[in-house]
Every structure is written in structure tokens, then in C-alpha cells.
Image: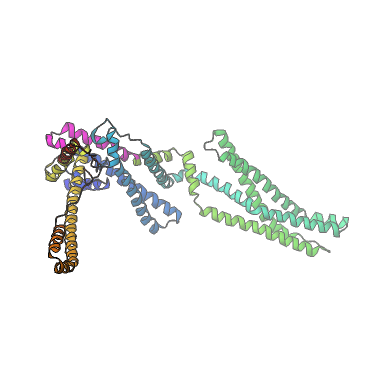
Amino acid sequence: MNKAVNEIRLFLFTCSGEDNYILKRCNANIQTRFALIGFFVLLIFTGCFFSATFFIISLFDGAKWVSLPMGIIWGAVIVNMYLLLLHTISPAIIPLSSKRKKNKYSNDNSDLNQNSNKFLTLSMNLRIGFMMLLAVIIAQPLNVFMFSSSIKSNIEKHKISERIKLYSLTNKQLIKEELTNQKEFNDKITTRLNLAETRLITSHLNIIKSKIATDSLFVINATKKLTEFNKIDEKFSLNDKEEEKKAKILNELESLLNNELISDENFITNINSIAIQGSLKKDFDDFKTNLTILVNDKIKNYNSLNILLNKSNFYIKTIQILFAESLFSWLLTLSVCAIFLLPIYFKYKVRSVCSLVFKTKEKNEAEIIKLREELINTTNFRWLENKIKSINISNIRTSDYYFQRMLIEHKIILEEYDHTKKVFKKNLTIKISLFNKASLERLNPLLEKLKQYNVQKYNEISGSIFKEYVDEEMIKYEYWLDCPFRTKMRAITKISNDEKGLLDFLYNQNTEINN
């Protein structure tokens, strides 16, 4: 049991983005705080996975083989971004010149500058704002999956309004063609028939006139009521009176649509019973055929729209309705935002807890206390460098996580820098030696010629040359007092041309080197 708990704890440490080796050396309180951060990060990954999975399932109509890998990828991307944000909240582990400049003009030398730094800076606000945006986006597929069944009736009402809206838009041109065909046929009746024949034909055309008038009236009434419905629907929240009015308009729109569909079906059935004889028989048959085609096109448009609307899940509209009408949707969204924000706050506060534990709950040696103070605010880099190189870090037992991390990383950097300098020194010395050898090989023939003519001059010049080309050990010159961190340059000493200036230069330089 203890082994399983320990493995879970180490896994949570890894999820928090911190060093397991150091955290295992801290006390239970510090470990619990970092494990809590890791738990929230794991919770964020789980939420992102399910959010992306549900969204892809809705997008690709239940394609689970696509949704699962996409959920894992999305969760990994968000968690990596989140861990990067958490990393930026940690105090500066390695000295930075910008931090040193700020501390130089600050009278507050607080621990790790943790308490003096403001949490809600502009940079932090921007990062938190970005994470909040991600949290809101991630919460919506979860809202739709969990609460969409509670607003099915609202979605059906929305489908009705969309069906009428699209039906009106797509059939408006067809109804205009009906009116145009009717006008053309009426013109033929007026110009080619007498009054008695006109009255006789007109009596046979009442069904057609009634149908075209019904279609025109449908477009006018539907457009008017849709405009009124949209004005109410655009409001974020509605009172009881507005809800009643909205439901009434929707019922009227549904009734208009049903009547129009019944009218189309009845017209197709009854139009074949209409026939006229005489000179306009062919024109009437053409008119009737065109009218039948237009009405059939309207019916086909409606069926196509109906299929399209039934396939659509109205994802965005579902989210809008949930926010407008479901309290649980708000609670879930706020919970996801809280899950994203809490680790940021915990990560910021844990630095103060580490400092408090070191100062009040641990009895450390004076040398360790001084080492920690020098790491935070270096005043004597030579002492700090020698101490870090000589100290055995495994012998230091403290629950100050950031102190241990600073110490380990400083030691690694200093050792690697010393190794780099040794390699640099060795390579440069070899190159200088090779250069000296090559130069002497080029000069020797010339010196031999000089020796034949003037031995005295040869001895003088060759002595000077061999003295110049002597192999020597090359040492890298340091421009900085705290190499390799390079936050403080050596002071440029101005020497006055007198005895006092020379003595000041010699003694000040020696003092600087000792420090």
C-alpha cells in the first residue's frame, strides 16, 4: 500500500513539472502542496481529453477512432502550455542581470524577492487571461455533453424558426415566378379573349389565384413574424411576458408553415382537375405545367431543408441556450476556470511556505543560512563559488525546495563552466603552440640566410624571435565578476598619471580580485 501511494505521489510530482529528486528530500507539507498542484494538472489533462473527444464525436458524427487520439493530443498540448506557465511563476533560480538591476535600486531584500514581487502584474494578468479563455473554451463541449438533453425543447423550437426562415428565403424567388407567370397569362387573356370568354376562364382559375395569393401572403406574414421573433431572441435574458410572446410567435410561424405545406400538397392534387378549351388551351397547359414545377420545387426545398436541419446538432446554438438558461452550465464553466487558476495561486504561495519552513521549522547551521542568503542576494561571489564547489549537496537536508534547486543548478553550471574553461585553455594553448612552430618553420630559412651574411645581426634577431615564440599556457580572461552568470561586470578603473593613482589602481585591483 505504501509503495503504491509513493508511486502515485511521485507521478503527481512529475505532473507538477518539478524535480522529483529534490521534492523527495522535502517534508510532507511541501510534498503535499506540490502533489496537489500535480493533481490539478492531471485534472486539467483529463478535462481537456474529454472535452476534445466529445467535440470531435459531435463534429464527425460519432467517429470515436478519430476522437480518442485527438483528445490525447489536445490534452498534451494544453498541459504543456500550462506547465510552461507554472514554470514562469517560479522565482528566478539563476541570476539575471535584469533582476540584479531591479534589486540594486530596491531597499527590500526579502527572501527570494518572493514577498516583494506583486502577483497580479501586467504579464501575469495576460497569462491568466489566456488560460481563462482556454478554460472557457474547454468547458463548452463538457456542457453540451452533460446538459444538452435538458434543452431539447429549445433546440426544437430553434429548428422551427430556422426551418421557416430558410423556407421563406429559398422559396421567395419561386413565389415571385408564380406571380410573374400569372401576370403573363392574365395579359394573354385580356388581349386575346372577349369579355364573356374572359369571365368563363377566370372562374376556372380561382384555385390557381387562391394558391398564388396564399403563397404571397405567407412570405409577407412569415417575414414580419420572423423579424419580430428575432428581436426577442437576440436578448440575452427574457422576462415571463417576453417568453410568452416568443412562444406565441413561434406557434404562429409553425402554423403558417404547416398551412403552406398543406396548401402545396392540395394544389398538386387539384390542379390536374383544371382544364380549359379554346385558343388559350396550349398557353394554359404551359402555365399549369410551370406552376406545378414551381410548387414541386418548393416541396423539394422543404424536404431538403428538413433533412439538413435534422442532421445538424446546432452546437453553437446549444452552447448559447445553455448559458442563457442553465445554471449548471455556468457552474461547470466556473469550476473549470477555478481548476485552471488554483495551481497558479498554489505555485505562487508555495515559495513563501518553503521560506517559512526554512526560517522557523528547521535548525540549520550558520554556514547554510549564509549560503542561502548569498544565493538569493550575492555579495561575495568568490566565497559563494568556492562554497558551492566544495559542499556535498546530499548532506544538506532542508525542505526549502527552491534553495535546494538553486544550489544544485548553480553547482552544475559552475562545474560545467570550469570544464568548458579547461577545454578552452587546452585547445587555445595547443593552437598557440602550433602557431609558434609554424611561424618558426617559416622564419628559419630567412634566419639561415641572414647568418651567412651577418652573424651578429643573426644572433640579435634570432634571440628576439625565439623569446617571442615561447609556448605558454593560455588563460581565459573574465570580464565579469560572477562568471558564468554575467550579471556584474568588472569596474573600469581610471588611472591618473601620478604616484597616488598608481597605488590606488594596484591596491583596489587586489581588493577586487580577493572579493
Q: Nearer the viewer, residue 439 or 388?
A: 439
Q: Is residue 289 left or right of residue 44?
A: right
One can see residue 400 in this view: no
What residue do we see at 43% from left, 44% from top? 147
- Give the magenta-colored segment's residue range: 341-370
> Which x, y percent locates residue 285?
76, 63
Q: Is residue 103 left or right of residue 252?
A: left
Indicate yes or no whether the magenta region holds residue 366: yes
Majority secondary structure of the magenta segment? helix
User: Against 183, is 123 above or below?
Assistant: above
Residue 25 found in image quarter? top left
Q: Nearer the viewer, residue 42 or 289?
A: 42
Indicate yes or no whether the magenta region holds residue 498: no
User: Against 317, is 113 above or below?
Assistant: above
User: Against 183, is 502 above or below?
Assistant: above
Q: Is residue 298 left or right of residue 68?
A: right
Residue 5 found in image quarter? top left
Quadrant placement of the C terminus: top left
What residue do we see at 33% from left, 35% from top? 119
> Which x, y percent locates residue 33?
24, 39
